[in-house]
Image: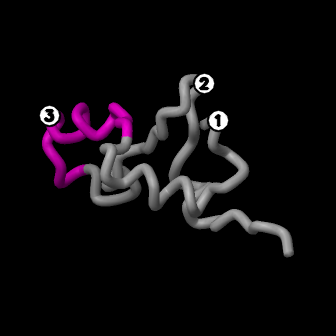
Amino acid sequence: MKIKTKKAAAKRFSFTATGKIKFKRAGKRHNMGNKSSKRKLALRSGGYLFDGDIKHIEKCLPNGSTR
């Protein structure tokens, strides 16, 4: 049986060329008028997953990993 990708994870995470997993910050979809400029600026930057979360996300994305 083929291994299937979890589509919810595929929409939220992506792999870099070196194998790290990138994500975008949550909280930028609506109610932007209530958030401070400092908070909106901080939400612009993405991030990389911590080591404890990597194994779980790699299971969800079996075809994306470069490891």
- Of circles 3 and 2, the one toward us is 2
Q: Which residue appears at 58% of the width and 63% of the height?
A: 60
Depth order, front residue of 18/11: 18
Give the number of the disc on residue 38. 3
Give the number of the disc on residue 44. none
Q: Which mark sits nearer the N-terminus, 1 or 2?
A: 2
Q: Which mark sits nearer the N-terminus, 1 or 3?
A: 3
Magenta part of the protein: which range?
A: 33-48
Looking at this rendering, what residue extends furthest in the bottom direction? Answer: 1
Q: Which residue appears at 42% of the width and 44% of the height?
A: 24
Label 1: element kind: loop
- Of circles 1 and 3, the one toward us is 1
Q: Which residue is mark 1?
A: 66
Q: Is residue 37 magenta?
A: yes
Question: Vertically, is 31 above or below 3?
Answer: above
User: In the image, is 58 to the left or to the right of 35?
Assistant: right
Give the Cα distance between marks 1 and 2.
8 Å
